[in-house]
Amino acid sequence: MKQIIAPVLAAASLLAIGATARAQEVVKVGLIAPMTGPQAAAGRQMVAGAKLYMALNGNTVAGKKIELLVRDDTGVADVTRRLAQELIVNDKAAVISGFGLTPLAIAVGPLITQAKVPAVIMVAGTASIVASSPYFVRVSFTLPQQTAPGAEWAAANGIKTVVSMVSDYGPGLDAQNAFKAKFEEKGGKVLEQLRAPLVNPDFAPFLQRAKDLKPDALMVFVPAPVAGSVMRQVLDRGFPEAKIKVVGPGDAFDDEQLNAMGDGVLGSVTSYNYSAAHDSAENKKFVAEYRKANNETRPNVIAVGGYDGMHAIYAALAKTNGDSTGPKLIEAFKGLSWESPRGPLTIDAQTREPVQNIYIRRVERKDGELYHIEFATYPNQKP
Ligand code: PHB
C-alpha cells in the first residue's frame, strides 16, 4: 500500500509545488487611497505617481509580475481597514500601500502586524504611526521633519512672533508642536496655537483671531488636498495687506494648486521635502512625464509619494530576489537608498522612516507660473 501511495503523493505534491510556483509569478500590491470624498485629490495624485513609476520601469521585478490593485477608502478609516483585510486575505496581496490621511494608516496597524504584511505609507505624516507596527515603512515625511527647519529659518530671518493655525488631528498637532519648540529655542515667540476641525472647517473665526493678535507671521498646516481653500481665505482676510507673512511646512502651499492661489502667495517662504521646481535630472524627467500622463497637471508631494512608494516596493523585491513573504520583504525595505525626484532618499534601517533633505523655498514666478524655488537645504533630516 505504502509503495503505491508514495509516488501518488509525490506527484500530487509536485503538482502543488508547480501551482504555488505559478501563483507566485504575480506579486499583488494593494494601493488603498481616497479616490472620492474631500481628500480625493490625494488618491488621484498617489495613484498617478505609482502608475507612472510602473509605466517608466516596467511591471516585472526579479521575474515576478507586479499587479497593482487600487481600492477607494473614501477617506474613512473603517473602510481602509476592511479593504486592507480583503486585500490581504482574499487577494493575497504581498504588500499594501497608500494611506492619504493619518487615521487611515493607523487603522491598519494591528492587521498588518498580525498578518505580517508590509504597508508602505505614501502620504500620512504623523510622527508616531510607523512605530505602531513593525510592518509599517514610510516613504513620505513626518510633520516634525518638514516643519522644524522652516521654524529655524523664520527665527533667523526677522520673524519674532507667530500664531499657528492647524487642522486638529495628528499631523497638525505635530506641526504645531515642532514649530513652537524650534522657533522658541531660536528666540521667537508663538503667541497662540489655534486648531480648526479637520472635517468641514470654518477657518474664519480662527483667522480673525490670528489677525487680531498682530503676529509677524501665521503658521498654517492643513492636509495638502485642501490647501487651496484655506489659502483663499487667508488671502481674502487681508493677511498680506496687514504685513503678516504665512510660514510653515509646504502642505498649505500645495504645488498642484499653487498657480490658482494667485500673486498673493508670491514671496512666501516654507520648508518642505518636495518642490516641482526641484533642480535635478530625476525631477525634470518626473515632472515632464507626470504632466504628459495627467492632463498637464503639476506633480506634488503626494504624487512623488506614490512614485517613491512603488520604487521602494520594486527595490525591496529586487533585494529579496522576488521573495514576497512578509518578514523577508519588510527587512528588504530597511536601508534602501535612492535618488528620488525630491532629492536623495533613504529608509532608515532602524526606524523604517524616510531620511531626506528639507528645503527652504520661496514662491516666485518662473516661466509665467508660480513655483516654490528652493534656496537653502537642511540635509539628511531624520523624522
Ligand atoms: C496626514 O493626514 O498625515 C497628512 C495628510 C496630508 C498632508 C500631510 C499629512 O499634506
Image: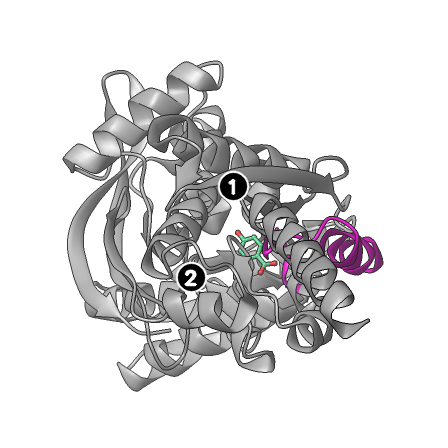
Q: In which image quadrant can residue 67 be found?
A: top right
Q: Which residue is mark 1?
A: 238
Q: Which residue is mark 2?
A: 141
Where's the N terminus, which quadrant? Answer: bottom right
The span picked out in magenta is 77-102
- In the rendered image, residue 81 lying in the magenta stretch gets the answer yes
Along the line of sight, which residue is nearer the eye, 151 or 12?
A: 12
Closer-to-camera residue (69/354): 69
Residue 19 image point, x, y percent: 65, 47
Q: Earlier in the sequence, mark 1 or mark 2?
A: 2
Q: Secondary structure at mark 1?
A: loop
Provide residue 324's location: percent of width, then percent of height. Answer: 51, 59
**Rendered residue at 68%/42% (across/down):** 39
Nearest to the eye among marks 1 and 2: give it.
Answer: 2
Tell me if I can see residue 233 in this picture: no
Q: Can you say which quadrant of the picture contains the C terminus?
A: bottom left
Judged from the image, the secondary structure of the residue bearing numbered disc 2 is loop
Foreground: 81 or 369? Answer: 81
- Residue 22 is covered by the magenta coloring: no
Residue 117, labelled with which disc? Answer: none
CA gap, disc 1 to disc 2? 31 Å
Asked whether mark 2 and ligand 1 are closer than 8 Å, the reply comes as: yes
Residue 208, placed above or below residue 303: below
- For this view, does 259 lie left or right of residue 154? right
Crowd around label 2: few <14 · some 14–19 · many ≥20 (10 Å): many
Kind of residue indicated by mark 2: Phe
Task: State left or right for residue 100 relative to residue 149.
Answer: right
Q: Quadrant of ligand 1?
A: bottom right
Q: Position of residue 281 (x, y in %)?
A: 15, 33
